[in-house]
Amino acid sequence: MIIDLQYLPSLEYFACLLKFEDVQIETHEHFQKQSYRNRCHILTSNKIDTLSVPVSNGNSKIFVKDLRIDYRQDWTRRHWGAIYSAYGKAPFYEFYSEYFKDILAKKPDFLFDLNLELLSICLKLLKIEKKFIFTEKYEKTVPNDFRGKIHPKKDFSENDFYEPLSYRQNFGSEFVPNLSVLDLIFCQGSQAGTILKGSVKD
């Protein structure tokens, strides 16, 4: 299968990864605005909050692997403040938060590098082994093409690989599905991988 890299991906994204043994990461697509490539959703005390990574030259046709992050905005502090507000009192925040904080503190130049490092640490914490192949050119038609399929404007029910398995979240009495994987990791710790595997639709 082939898929785009996303920022602190949703559970739907990981469910998709788990359905396939061989995973190709698209490096030669053009950046698409208002997608999960540079945003994610977390659950705060009163709403779902969207965290968005600002990028330079996002309007021009540039390969996603060459897209630079815009640090003229103090977005890392905003993101970490929102993450702490949402999950600072979650059961497993203190065990796992430094992994993510350290990656953001490095301030990688490129969005692709940031997303890949965050995805790698998420898989490690979830105890999921997955090797990636990176595309060397853009091909319009490929089998098992999931580029752009997981999108903020598409409900996860439109795809066929994620079936929410509820777990105790930090806020609210009603379960909110398909948030960033951060929600699952900080709320469920070592059980996160098991819950995620149980969310993969047969």
Image (cartoon, rainbow, N blue to C red):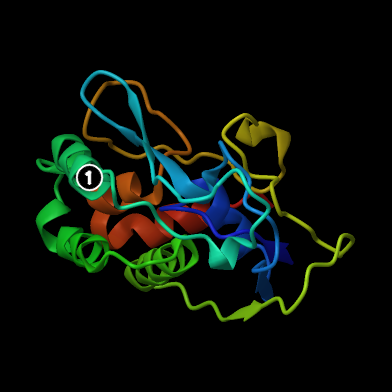
Secondary structure state at the residue bearing disc 1: loop
Residue 114 screen position, x and y as percent = 40, 64
> Can residue 10 be seen?
no
Is 48 placed left or right of 169 in the picture? right
Residue where numbered disc 1 is placed? 74
Q: Position of residue 196 (x, y in %)?
A: 46, 54
Residue 143, located in which quarter of the rendered image?
A: bottom right
Residue at the extreme right: 141
Question: Picture quarter containing residue 48?
Answer: top left
Q: Position of residue 57 (x, y in %)?
A: 53, 50
Instruction: Tell me the kind of residue under disc 1.
Output: Asp
Q: In the rendered picture of this protein, how many numbered marks are placed on residues?
A: 1
Which residue sits at x=39%, y=50%?
181
Q: Is residue 190 visible?
A: yes
- Residue 183 x, y percent position in the rendering: 32, 44
Q: Quadrant of the N terminus?
A: bottom right
